[in-house]
Image (cartoon, rainbow, N blue to C red):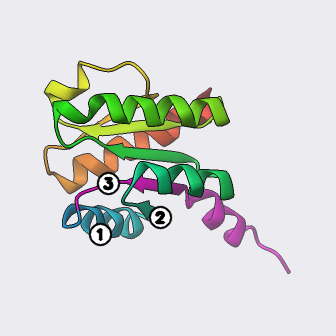
Amino acid sequence: MFDGTDENESKSKASILHVCTRDVLRPVRDQILRVAGHNVDSSETHEDALDKVRENKYDLVLIDIDSQHHVQAAEQLCTELKKADPNQRVAFVCNWRVAILNDCPNDIVRSEFDPVAFVTGVAAALSDEETT
């Protein structure tokens, strides 16, 4: 007998690709997202991220930008992801100064390290997907 519980649980688990070159931060954020109930893959490089997106479907691709100097690379990755799949949701994880400098992603998740704010930002990026 099926009571719908498993279906609801699988719907609540979003599939997220977290792209982050920072070896210390990537596993911490990955774990925060898993504890929040998401399925998480991570990538250290933009090239690996593109390969993963070609092989898997993700509800959201989070691209970490650790400084203003990396905005261009993140925007290029975002553009390539959108070329491959125009419906791919992309959010940049960055500080407020970087956030105002770009226009490619669907959402900006602020990275001043606050795990609750991080999870809340990811949830907002995912909920936008459901309403569009």
Q: CA distance from mark 3 to mark 1?
A: 9 Å
Location of residue 130 in the rendering, given as x and y in whole percent from the top left corner:
61, 36
Location of residue 99 in the rendering, given as x and y in whole percent from the top left corner:
24, 26
Q: Based on the displayed image, in which of its 4 quarters is residue 22 positioned? A: bottom left
Q: Secondary structure at mark 3?
A: loop
Residue at coordinates 32% horizontally, 46% vertically from top-left? Answer: 120
Taking 64 as reference, is 79 left or right? right
Location of residue 79 in the rendering, given as x and y in whole percent from the top left corner:
51, 28
Earlier in the chain: of badge 3 and badge 2, it is 3
Task: Examine the structure image and report whether residue 59 is included in the region drawn in magenta.
Answer: no
In the image, residue 15 sits, relative to residue 62, either above or below, namely below
The residue singled out by tag 1 in the image is 27
Residue at coordinates 55% horizontally, 34% vertically from top-left? Answer: 80
Earlier in the chain: of badge 3 and badge 1, it is 3
Residue 20, which numbered label?
3
Earlier in the chain: of badge 2 and badge 1, it is 1
Amino acid marked by disc 3: Cys
Taking 100 as reference, is 53 left or right? right
Q: Nearer the viewer, residue 28 or 131?
A: 28
The residue singled out by tag 2 in the image is 40
Residue range corresponding to the magenta coloring: 1-22
Taking 40 as reference, is 82 left or right? right
Q: CA distance from mark 3 to mark 2?
A: 13 Å
